[in-house]
Image (cartoon, grey):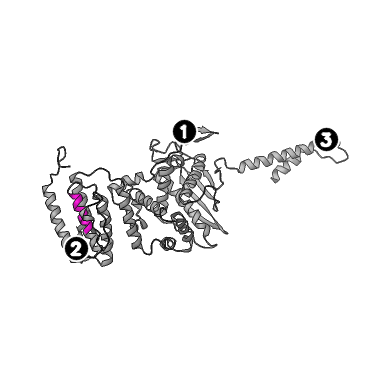
């Protein structure tokens, strides 16, 4: 700016106030003012980033890095599971995603926000590239930076927005100098999947359809009613047992990347949805988020927020098992073939274990019978296995081919009898003789004897069943 000023001064001829007419003096002054105006304007434009877009609420600032080699990237543009982003599209999509997620938590769209979120787009060589979220405290509020590839898998895109939005809500109650909230993975991914299922057409704007004031968007004018956002989760969980509460608490990288066929995503979506269905569920979920900065792990905040419903992890497991059974029973789907039914039931009646042939050997995987596992486990671990088996048997008994569905029901009642739980009637018939409530806890020896008897009946049923070979007809 100093060099510009010297250049302007050099253009003005020397004069004194007395030798130059007032009109001419005014003309030079006008030139000087215009020059400084242009110089200032040029300086402003030079520092403004043409690749930056602010969202309508001002909470999101989206910037992008130029692609130095746009033709070197080999991405499948026709893949519908890949979200393709630019600054304008992301600024709109992020706002819509926020409104949808807030609605799930009972927050109005006009609620105030606290932390600003900076979304930085960079060229992605592959949709598998990871997303980085950084939380930065400043005085009494936090700001957030999210490094996003401009093309990524839909699940990762939704997880990134869900994660940073939940972090922003939770850290509003963080004390100055405190630590950032630890958001449970099942809540981040569960809400992300719920938003995609409920408002996917509105929050995924990577395939623009029309132009609106030079901005390509997909405009949704119709109001859809009666759509089940859990329909996708229902399909998955009818074929594969849902994860337990303990498994949801510690998901593996493979599960979070979808390598398990979507079971983790479906379980997380259903789990958070069922929590929100509890009495004052949304209020309790907000209390959970608000309490996270005060605790080193989310479990403490969870039981503090949902203390009216759960006192211990075992209470959550019992409640969750019943919710999963009830969820699956609403639409049982078609029955499996005899061959598939045999494999499914046999898998449910075994327990995976690891063992070592030597102290320095790598662990090997094997499956042992349910009875062998129950004899060797301590009471707490034994009850956890039984609770999982009771739940999984209830999930599949409707889909097993006769007579294995009836056998699965008998196995479930026997295990439930030992646990001392009141077993429900089989879903296949409300008046089933196996649905008599049982409140008496039998001994371990009695239960093992009944399981051995059921195993003999199952082997007899397998022997009488004709397993169809490939290309032939058989018992269905």
Residue 83 position, x and y percent, is 43, 41
Tell me the distance, in whole angstroms, between the alpha carbons under discs 1 and 2: 62 Å
Foreground residue among 344 and 23: 344
Task: Tell me if residue 27 can be seen.
Answer: yes
Name the front one of labels 1 and 2.
2
Magenta span of residues: 403-413
Residue 390 position, x and y percent, is 26, 57
Asked which secondary structure carries label 2, the reply is: helix
Residue ID at (23%, 44%): 335
Asked which secondary structure carries label 3, the reply is: helix
User: Residue lying farthest top?
Assistant: 210
Tell me the distance, in whole angstroms, between the alpha carbons under discs 1 and 3: 59 Å
Task: Tell me if residue 346 can be seen.
Answer: no
Residue 177 position, x and y percent, is 53, 63
Residue that carries the numbered disc 2 in the rendered image: 447
Of the two numbered discs 3 and 2 on the same chain, state the one appearing first in sequence. Answer: 3
Foreground residue among 123 and 263: 263
Q: Is residue 160 left or right of residue 110?
A: left
Is 370 in the magenta? no
Of the two numbered discs 1 and 3 on the same chain, state the one appearing first in sequence. Answer: 3
Residue that carries the numbered disc 3 in the rendered image: 24
Q: Is residue 166 above or below residue 78?
A: below
Label 3 with label 2: CB-CB less than 8 Å: no
Mark 2: few, some, or many residues within 10 Å (few <14, many ≥20)?
Answer: many
């Amino acid at each position: 700016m100093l060099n510009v000023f010297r250049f302007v001064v050099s253009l003005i001829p020397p004069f004194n106030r007395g030798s130059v007419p007032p009109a001419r003096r005014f003309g030079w002054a006008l030139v000087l003012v215009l020059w400084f105006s242009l110089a200032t304007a040029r300086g402003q434009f030079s520092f403004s980033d043409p690749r930056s877009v602010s969202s309508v609420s001002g909470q999101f600032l989206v910037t992008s890095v130029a692609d130095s080699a746009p033709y070197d990237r080999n991405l499948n543009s026709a893949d519908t599971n890949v979200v393709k982003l630019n600054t304008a599209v992301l600024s709109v999509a992020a706002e819509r995603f926020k409104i949808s997620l807030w609605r799930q938590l009972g927050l109005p769209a006009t609620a105030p926000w606290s932390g600003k979120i900076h979304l930085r787009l960079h060229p992605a060589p592959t949709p598998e590239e990871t997303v980085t979220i950084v939380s930065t405290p400043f005085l009494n509020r936090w700001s957030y930076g999210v490094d996003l590839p401009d093309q990524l898998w839909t699940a990762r895109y939704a997880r990134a927005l869900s994660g940073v939005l939940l972090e922003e809500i939770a850290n509003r109650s963080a004390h100055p100098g405190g630590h950032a909230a630890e958001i449970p993975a099942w809540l981040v991914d569960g809400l992300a999947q719920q938003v995609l299922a409920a408002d996917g057409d509105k929050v995924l704007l990577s395939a623009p359809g029309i132009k609106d004031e030079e901005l390509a968007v997909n405009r949704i004018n119709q109001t859809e009613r009666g759509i089940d956002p859990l329909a996708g989760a229902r399909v998955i969980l009818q074929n594969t047992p849902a994860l337990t509460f303990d498994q949801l608490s510690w998901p593996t990288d493979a599960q979070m990347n979808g390598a398990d066929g979507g079971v983790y995503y479906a379980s997380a979506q259903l789990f958070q949805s069922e929590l929100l269905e509890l009495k004052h569920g949304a209020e309790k979920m907000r209390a959970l988020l608000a309490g996270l900065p005060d605790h080193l792990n989310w479990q403490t905040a969870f039981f503090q927020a949902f203390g009216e419903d759960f006192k211990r992890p075992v209470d959550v497991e019992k409640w969750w098992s019943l919710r999963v059974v009830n969820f699956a029973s609403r639409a049982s789907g078609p029955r499996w073939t005899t061959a598939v039914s045999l494999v499914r039931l046999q898998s449910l009646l075994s327990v995976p274990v690891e063992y070592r042939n030597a102290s320095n050997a790598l662990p090997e995987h094997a499956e042992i019978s349910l009875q062998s596992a129950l004899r060797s486990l301590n009471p707490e671990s034994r009850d956890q296995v039984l609770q999982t088996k009771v739940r999984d048997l209830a999930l599949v008994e409707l889909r097993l081919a006769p007579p294995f569905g009836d056998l699965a029901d008998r196995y479930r009642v026997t295990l439930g009898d030992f646990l001392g739980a009141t077993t429900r009637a089989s879903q296949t018939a409300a008046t089933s003789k196996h649905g008599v409530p049982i409140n008496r806890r039998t001994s371990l020896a009695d239960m093992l004897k009944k399981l051995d008897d059921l195993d003999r009946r199952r082997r007899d049923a397998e022997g009488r069943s004709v397993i169809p070979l490939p290309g032939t007809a058989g018992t269905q």
